[in-house]
Image (cartoon, helix red, strand yellow):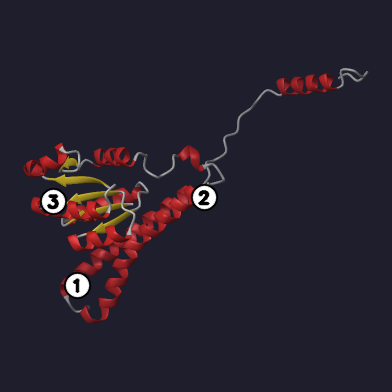
Amino acid sequence: MILLVSTDSATTDHLPTFLEGQFFPLLVAKSKEETLELASRQPVRLAIVDLEDPLEVYDLLHGILDLREDASIIVLSDPEHRQAVMPLIQAGIVTHIEKPLDPAQLKSKIGQLLGQEPLSPPRAQVASPEMDPASMDRLIMNLAHRLKNPLVSIRTFAHLFKERFNDSQFQKDFYQTMRQEVERIDCLIDQLIEFSELPDPCMALHPVLPIVEEAVQRTNDRFRGSKVRL
């Protein structure tokens, strides 16, 4: 499980889409309280922390590690804040990535820290009609978490819709959130369809003679002691 912690709307708006596109199970928190609550209830293996105040990072990291002492941590920060987290970097407690963020670099770091590649299966493996139970469990967990976040947002706005419909700011937030969350769900459905499709069969001509010769040889070997010959 990956926990993304950020007070930067640019990060929380765009990074989840990228990470979920790689089939990483993901939760998002926007405050220390929400972070610690999720870390206490969920098996967090990696926390990606992006906070504008470097002083908050120390307090938050201690809280996460108290709850999940084996969790890995990536800290995202602007270049001018690197010095503030340098002691943690030197102690090997955190991995640091400077912003602006390079998605490929983040993806690589996540793979290294989790000891695995993203959970999205290579296309060549999709053709297999069978899936082992562990892979099926991961897929179901991924689907549940990737659907939960947009559905929570939609449900929250649905509860507020009647009483705040005439609020112009609410209308703006409603439109933006609904569009974003519907796109996330639509993207997930497209990926599921792609995941379930088998590649087109590849047909090619093969010489028949070697197959016939092998069958004849096996038959003759089997009846070597009799008078039957092909």
Looking at the image, tell me whether mark 3 or mark 2 is earlier in sequence order: 3
Can residue 31 be seen by looking at this rendering? no
**Residue named by callout 3:** 58
Residue 84 at x, y = what percent? 8, 44
Q: Residue at x 20, y 55 (%)?
A: 63
Q: Residue at x 88, y 18 (%)?
A: 229
Residue 213 quadrant: top right
Q: Residue at x 18, y 60 (%)?
A: 32
- Residue nearest the viewer, comparing 158 with 205: 158
Image mark for residue 133: 2
Relative to 229, say whether 13 is above or below.
below
Say if mark 2 contacts mark 1, CB within 8 Å. no
146 on left or right of 13: right
Relative to 5, say whether 228 is above or below.
above
Q: Amino acid at mark 2?
A: Pro
45 on left or right of 89: right
State the CA–CA distance, disc 3 to disc 2: 39 Å
Looking at the image, tell me whether mark 2 or mark 1 is earlier in sequence order: 2
User: Closer to us: mark 2 or mark 1?
Assistant: 2
Residue 226 quadrant: top right
- Residue nearest the viewer, comparing 2 with 207: 2
Residue 114 at x, y = what percent? 33, 42
**Label 1 secondary element:** helix
State the CA–CA distance, disc 1 to disc 3: 34 Å
**Label 2 secondary element:** helix
Image mark for residue 170: 1
**Label 3 secondary element:** helix
Q: Amino acid at mark 1?
A: Phe
